[in-house]
């Protein structure tokens, strides 16, 4: 069976985010971009499914500008077989991302679509669920364990109260949580091989989908800054301050 | 038109986060109705009817809803959505799982994890781990919204007297079945609603050492949390993770022990009223946000703190 993995190119998690002076968004010029960490986990999981024989082919997809090809090449170096860039310079919101991924799922007929649980830039945590809804597939979100057997996926999910395990018919959508796996590093030979793997570029506008943003961003601001307080020298002083000054205990 | 709030419960009680979602829904300018779906959950519906400001409770009591699956709950909500201006839920793992499925089926772009209602179509939401706040305006006729519970004072649990009307179950959208769960049992208060939280990080070195935190939590009536590093290393269970991709907490007092203060961790506790940091590295970034910083070895400081709190 085929697996489709969605990878988003985001500002690297180590970059200190700065809001633009005109409050239109965050500074993206001259900052490092990388694959969303949850999506690296998604790619790794697909590769492990291929290594264990459950998956025969891995297709990675990203939606974004031409520069987003770099995250596809990285995924190919980890072990994906081919890549698709849906190219656009426009802002594509999660509902529209889900519509594009649905069209690709209909074309490629994967038995499993693996996404990150959230992208660390927009923090929406919704694209996988939206994709499952549009396809009428079951969903296993926030997965920390995935087992494919007998035409079903057994997904252990990280929920607020602990863990929950569901059984889903395939095809299904799975979104990754941090503890699903630890992504490997690509080896140099595999990075070289990845350069020769197929990468299709499809302009988003040719898909004939309604991709118009539904949310207008009116303003982006920096949050109120918290400043450092004081240093206490001893535990006794700390307890005293919490009692008499902060009055929280 | 009213807003429909999807209630979260454990089969017996309404979760406090749902009352925060009600508070946010009431800011939209219309009535707030609560939808309770479950099996044998008349008691939860009665809780829901008592929540201040709620004017109607819809009860879908059916074995189909014995476990809160997105595949069964989404069609139920979608079936009711035509009568509503907004669908609202708390941004817990429950709300985050179900609501995007509702939104997409209704061809609506969900507005995730709002922290303020500016007007019925305009909201503030954190992006980039809370390092920026975006004000967004929705062009969709129906609003589908998840709410960061810590940003809205919960509606009172008593004072309301809403009528309870039953609503029929709807066929599931896809084949998913519940197999089992392993819920963490704890004597401690719930992390997201506790007044005091004490969290341990990689500096704790192992799970056993979290025992040093327990007597302090006991004295303060605190919940115990952790950094991602502590969870990844297996010191404590996943449901204790505080941060951008874990739980968001905003207690009166947050004590960070052996936690460096990475941006992803600060995203989950930066709104706490008073922050205390205990760390042996005086240049740890956690000290930049701490109201009270103690540079010390935690293996010395924690027993001392436990003793000081115990003696009064
Ligand atoms: C040119 C441009 C400008 C933008 N400007 C703004 C702006 O000003 N303000 C703003 O708030 N947002 C902006 N965005 C972000 C955009 O609006 C959406 O918020 C974003 O694409 C989807 O939200 P999310 O990633 O948080 O979704 P989530 O639901 O958190 O993502 C979950 C998962 O979905 C998949 N996924 C999501 N997006 C993609 C993608 N593009 N390609 C492949 N897989 C994907 C990944 O697997 C990801 O882990 C911009 C995007 C672009 C391309
Ligand atoms: C996509 C993504 C999502 C993430 N989400 C989260 C999240 O939700 N929550 C989260 O917490 N992190 C998250 N992280 C991880 C985050 O970047 C940090 O790696 C993590 O928070 C570090 O945990 P820590 O502070 O416990 O460990 P460290 O950074 O290793 O810090 C340990 C601290 O303990 C101190 N220490 C050690 N020994 C002692 C001692 N004996 N006495 C006193 N102090 C001592 C050290 O001085 C140090 O400051 C995420 C990362 C990524 C990439």
Image (spheres, rainbow, N blue to C red):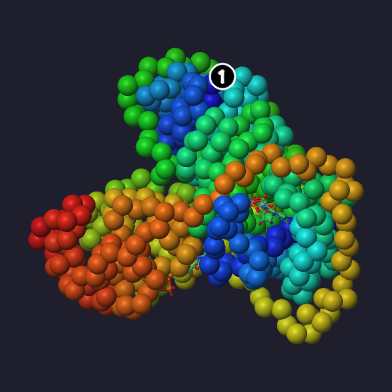
Disc 1 under 8 Å from ligand 1? The reply is no
* Residue located 37% across and 37% down the image: B153
Which x, y percent locates residue B111? Answer: 59, 40
Name the foreground residue: B96 vs B154: B154
Picture mark count = 1
- Hey, which quadrant is residue A95 in on the image? top right
- Taking A98 as reference, is B185 left or right? left
Name the foreground residue: B115 vs B55: B115
What is the residue that sits farthest to the left in this orientation? B311
* Residue located 73% across and 83% down the image: A187
- Say if B189 sits above or below A69 in the image: above
- Taking B44 as reference, is A75 left or right? right
For the N terminus of chain B, the image quarter is top right
Q: Chain of mark 1?
A: B
- Taking B216 as reference, is A119 left or right? right
Q: Whereabouts is ligand 2, in terms of quadrant?
A: bottom left
Label 1 environment density (alpha carbons within 10 Å; few <14, some 14–19, many ≥20): few
Q: Which residue is mark 1?
A: B1
Which x, y percent locates residue B119? Answer: 52, 31
- Hey, which quadrant is residue B143 in on the image? top right
For the C terminus of chain B, the image quarter is bottom left
- Taking B225 as reference, is A200 left or right? right
> Is residue B142 in view?
yes
* Residue located 65% across and 40% down the image: A215
């Amino acid at each position: 069976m085929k697996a489709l993995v969605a990878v988003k190119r985001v500002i690297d998690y180590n970059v200190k985010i700065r809001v633009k002076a005109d409050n239109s968004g965050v500074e993206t010029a001259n900052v490092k971009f990388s694959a969303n960490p949850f999506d690296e986990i998604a790619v790794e999981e697909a590769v492990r499914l291929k290594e264990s024989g459950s998956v025969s082919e891995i297709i990675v997809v990203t939606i974004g500008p031409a520069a987003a090809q770099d995250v596809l090449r990285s995924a190919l170096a980890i072990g994906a077989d081919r890549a698709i860039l849906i190219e656009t310079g426009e802002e594509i919101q999660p509902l529209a991302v889900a519509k594009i991924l649905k069209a690709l799922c209909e074309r490629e007929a994967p038995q499993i679509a693996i996404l990150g649980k959230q992208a660390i830039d927009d923090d929406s945590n919704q694209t996988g669920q939206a994709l499952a809804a549009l396809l009428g597939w079951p969903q296993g979100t926030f997965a920390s364990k995935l087992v494919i057997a007998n035409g079903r996926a057994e997904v252990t999910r990280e929920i607020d109260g602990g863990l929950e395990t569901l059984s889903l018919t395939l095809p299904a959508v799975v979104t990754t949580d941090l503890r699903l796996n630890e992504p490997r590093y690509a080896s140099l030979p595999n990075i070289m091989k990845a350069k020769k793997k197929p990468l299709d570029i499809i302009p988003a506008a040719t898909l004939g989908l309604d991709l118009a943003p539904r949310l207008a961003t009116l303003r982006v601001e920096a949050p109120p800054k918290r400043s450092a307080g004081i240093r206490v020298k001893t535990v006794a002083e700390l307890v005293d301050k919490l009692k008499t000054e902060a009055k929280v205990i | 038109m009213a807003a429909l709030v999807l209630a979260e419960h454990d089969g017996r009680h309404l979760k406090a986060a749902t009352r925060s979602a009600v508070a946010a829904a009431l800011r939209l300018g219309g009535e707030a109705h609560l939808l309770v779906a479950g099996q044998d959950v008349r008691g939860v519906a009665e809780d829901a009817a008592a929540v201040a400001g709620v004017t109607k409770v819809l009860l879908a009591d059916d074995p189909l809803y014995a476990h809160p699956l997105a595949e069964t709950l989404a069609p139920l909500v979608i079936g009711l959505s035509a009568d509503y201006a907004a669908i609202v839920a708390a941004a817990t793992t429950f709300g985050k799982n179900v609501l995007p499925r509702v939104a997409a089926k209704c061809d609506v772009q969900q507005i995730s994890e709002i922290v303020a209602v500016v007007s019925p179509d305009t909201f503030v939401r954190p992006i980039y781990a809370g390092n920026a706040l975006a004000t967004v305006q929705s062009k969709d006729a129906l609003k589908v919204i998840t709410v960061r519970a810590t940003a809205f004072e919960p509606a009172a649990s008593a004072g309301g007297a809403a009528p309870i009307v039953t609503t029929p179950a709807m066929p599931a959208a896809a084949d998913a079945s519940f197999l089992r769960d392993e819920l963490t049992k704890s004597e401690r208060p719930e992390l997201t609603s506790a007044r005091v939280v004490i969290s341990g990080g990689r500096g704790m070195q192992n799970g056993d050492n979290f025992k040093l935190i327990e007597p302090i939590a006991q004295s303060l009536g605190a919940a115990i949390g952790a950094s991602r590093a502590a969870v990844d290393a297996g010191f404590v269970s996943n449901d204790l993770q505080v941060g951008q991709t874990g739980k968001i907490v905003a207690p009166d007092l947050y004590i960070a022990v052996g936690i460096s203060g990475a941006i992803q961790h600060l995203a989950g506790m930066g709104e706490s009223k008073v922050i205390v940091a205990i760390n042996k590295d005086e240049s740890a970034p956690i000290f930049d946000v701490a109201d009270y910083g103690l540079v010390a070895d935690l293996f010395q400081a924690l027993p001392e703190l436990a003793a000081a709190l115990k003696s009064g």
